[in-house]
Image: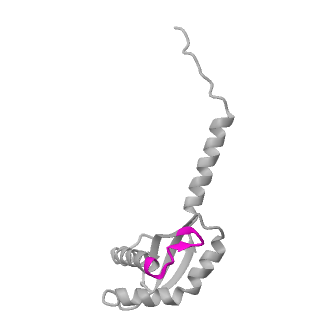
Amino acid sequence: MEEGKRQRQVAGVLQEEFNDVFQRLGLNMIDGGMVSISSVKVTPDLLEARVYLSLFKVADTTVAMKKIEDRAWEIKKELANRVKNQLRRIPVLHFYLDDTLDYVFKMEELLKSISTSTPSATTTPAAP
């Protein structure tokens, strides 16, 4: 099912505000790693928001996600102060780990290992 226009608008506003809230609360850097909001998806009734977080160079992702979930109330309160004039109800927040970046790095490693393990066969063009 395709997202509606209002869903995309609300998700965009929430994503921008999440970036500011995470910086303000000091959650953009956890355990020496970087935390960024990769995307926000909102349900059609605008009552739930799924926030996908990308963790880069974080030693333990489960601990980092736990820290963020422990401060979810504080995040929601700060978010509510910022978007109270744009939304009637503040959505329930669900945080998910977005492992797309890890997947990309793993695929790049595999491609590099394949290219280095197979000798490049230089073919000479066949004579006509």
Residue 14 horizontal side relative to residue 108, left or right = left
Taking depth in this image into account, of 30 and 50 the one nearest to the observer is 30
* 28 in relation to 114, above or below: below
Q: Quadrant of the N terminus?
A: bottom left
Residue plotted at (42% across, 84% down): 45
Q: Residue furthest right?
A: 117
* 92 in relation to 2, above or below: below
Residue 68 found in image quarter: bottom right
Give how far across and how far down residue 34 sits, in percent. 53, 68
Q: Residue furthest left?
A: 85
Residue 93 horizontal side relative to residue 119, left or right = left
Residue 30 shown in magenta: yes
Colour mapping used in the image: one colour
Residue plotted at (42% across, 88% down): 78
Give how far across and how far down residue 10 sits, in percent. 37, 78
The residue stretch that appears in magenta: 23-34
Taking depth in this image into account, of 12 and 59 the one nearest to the observer is 59
Give how far across and how far down residue 72 sits, in percent. 53, 86
Residue 115 horizontal side relative to residue 15, left or right = right
